[in-house]
Image: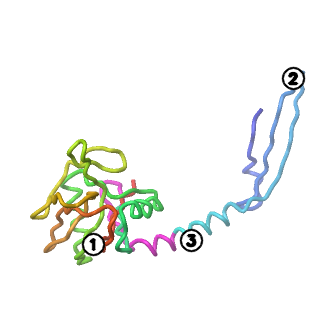
Amino acid sequence: MSVEFGLQEMKRDYDFRCVVRLVSSNGSHVSLNVSSTLHVMKSFHQLKSLQSSVTDLLFHEEPLTFQHHRYHLGHMSSVKSVEAANFCAILGGYLAEINSADELGSIEKYLTPYNLTKPILVGGTYAEKESKWIFQRGGKDVKILKWLDGEPRKDVMEKCLSLMTIKNEVFMKVISCVERRHRQKYLCEVE
């Protein structure tokens, strides 16, 4: 059995012709030709427009690009960690995972013009059993930790990693993964 799509015979960008050729048990060839119209391009453009609208609603206009990854700062505040991760997934991404001092420096330059005074959720949670910080997405160790004075605090039940901008410098701070009291935003990373 084979399936062919007759792309050269497309009259419009969303018409297609499908040919199925079968060989019966006695060796004779059987063909089935089907032509159909599927409004793929129209639907695709509608989906792209919808995605663009959602992206504009959830994220600031200009993302940061660093080593072929894009970083998007979320508009919404007072989001839980799981909600922020879901917003990032809309872009095909995840909460930003900071893996190097250069990456943290680029993020610092990106965030500075926004003059943010509230925490920004990024990837990272404290694993009590292992007594270490790990990324939620893959469980790998968080290696770059630039703590704000007095951090990491031990009084927070569910510990998530966030960034704070203080005098144009970014530091890390522990916040609750489930509370909204910090009015935190979020930073997504897309590969």
Does the stretch in magenta take in 54?
yes
Residue type at mark 3?
Ser
In the rendered image, residue 32, in percent from the top left (x then y), is placed at 86, 41
Of the residues under marks 2 and 1, which one precedes in the sequence? 2
Query: What residue would you read off at disc 2?
Result: 25
Pick the front one: 84 or 36: 84
Foreground: disc 3 or disc 1: 1
- The residue that appears at 36% across and 65% down in the rendered structure is 80
**Residue at x 29% of width, y 44% of height:** 140
The secondary structure type at the circle numbered 3 is: helix
Can you identify the residue that label 1 sits on? 182
Residue 58 is left or right of residue 9, and the answer is left
Task: Reply above or below: 25 against 93.
Answer: above
Q: Which residues are magenta?
A: 52-70
Question: Looking at the image, is mark 3 or mark 2 earlier in the sequence?
Answer: 2
> Which residue occupies the foreground of this view, 79 or 34?
79
Q: Split into 4 quadrants, where in the image is the N terminus?
A: top right
Amino acid type assigned to the residue bearing label 1 in the image: His
Kindly identify the residue that appears in the image at 74 percent across and 51 percent down: 8
Task: Find numbered disc 1 in the image and state the secondary structure of the residue it sits on.
Answer: loop
Q: CA distance from mark 2 to mark 1?
A: 70 Å
In the rendered image, the residue lying farthest to the top is 26
Q: Is residue 111 magenta?
A: no
Residue 47 position, x and y percent, is 59, 66
Q: Which residue is mark 3?
A: 49
Q: How much space separates mark 3 and mark 1, taking CA atoms?
A: 33 Å
Counting the numbered discs, the total is 3
Q: Amino acid type of disc 2?
A: Ser
The reply to whether dot 2 and dot 1 touch (C-beta < 8 Å) is: no
Quarter holding residue 159: bottom left
**Outermost residue toward the left in this view:** 149
Graded by Cα atoms within 10 Å as few (under 14), some (14 to 19) or many (20 or more), the crowding at tag 3 reads few
